[in-house]
Amino acid sequence: MGAQQASVNVICMKWGTLYGPEYANRLYAMTARNLCRPFRFVCFTDDSNGLREEIEALPLPTIHIDDPYQSTPWKKLALYNPELGDLSGPTLFFDLDIVITGSLDKFFDHPGDYCVIHNWTQPKQINGNTSVFRFDIGAHSDLLDLFHSKATQHWIDRYRIEQTYVSQELHKQGKLTYWPKEWCVSFKVHCLPGGWKFPRIFLNWFKPSKLPKTASICVFHGHPNPDEALAGRWPGKWYKRLLPASWISDYWVE
């Protein structure tokens, strides 16, 4: 018999009221169906009510963010504290609004110090999309130290969003690695027949979305969220319409 694989960590963050506990519960269920090795699933949150018992709820890690940015994705930089509870080792982070559609074990086997999605909307730039990334607990505490060294507005002016800050700073260190592009897809870029730009966007009125066969994770950045896409709703401008993405219900379940 071969040696038993070491346990890994899968984590998410939930604060405020934008996403209810059902998002974390579905994320756990999708992880359990698609990850063969032993794992701990931890949700860093300010409200653990409604979370299923298999989820370990821990307080949000410490970070100092100036107003009015305390509830923005910049809060994800708190994950680079030297310690996160009693966690250690390889850790895969998921945003709450993703749909897992295939095997996750390869995300732990893929080589690299820090692995992240290459941002689909900026393919000619080095920026990552931090909806899905892997790191070792405590390995990048310098990112948080650097962030704390200046006012939040300094970093907003320089990088605008958290994932650009992380990508640019890790690229300088030679520590940025991307997932193979077929593993993580964007619902708007890869699944909608007309994408999200004129004039092809109008195809979405008449043709349904389709999940690429190679995808293990579908990311819903901005709107629509998975529940909105499933119902055929796309909040926003009048031309943002889509047919119900019924295939989501095959994966996005507890």
Image (cartoon, helix red, strand yellow):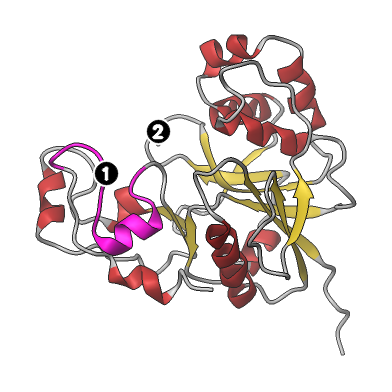
**Relative depth, front residue between 21 and 219:** 21
Mark 1 = which residue? Answer: 235
Q: Amino acid at mark 1?
A: Pro
Question: Does 109 sit above or below residue 111?
Answer: below
Q: Is residue 226 left or right of residue 183?
A: left
Q: Is residue 145 left or right of residue 175?
A: right
Q: Amino acid at mark 2?
A: Gln
Comes first in the chain, label 1 or label 2: 2
Q: Provide residue 253's location: percent of width, then percent of height.
A: 48, 73
Tag 1 secondary structure: loop
- Residue beneath the point at 49% across and 44% down: 18
Question: Does 183 sit above or below residue 147?
Answer: below
Q: Provide residue 12's location: percent of width, then percent of height.
A: 65, 51
Helix, strand or loop for the magenta stretch, by majority: loop
Q: Provide residue 171's location: percent of width, then percent of height.
A: 63, 29
- Residue beneath the point at 77% across and 38% down: 61
Circle 1 packing at 10 Å, graded few (<14), some (14-19), many (20+), is: some
**Relative depth, front residue between 162 and 169:** 162
Mark 2 = which residue? Answer: 122
Determine which quarter of the picture holds residue 29.
Answer: bottom right
For the record, the magenta segment spans 223-239
Q: Is residue 4 left or right of residue 157?
A: right
Q: Which mark is residue 125?
A: none
Question: Does 219 sit above or below residue 6?
Answer: above
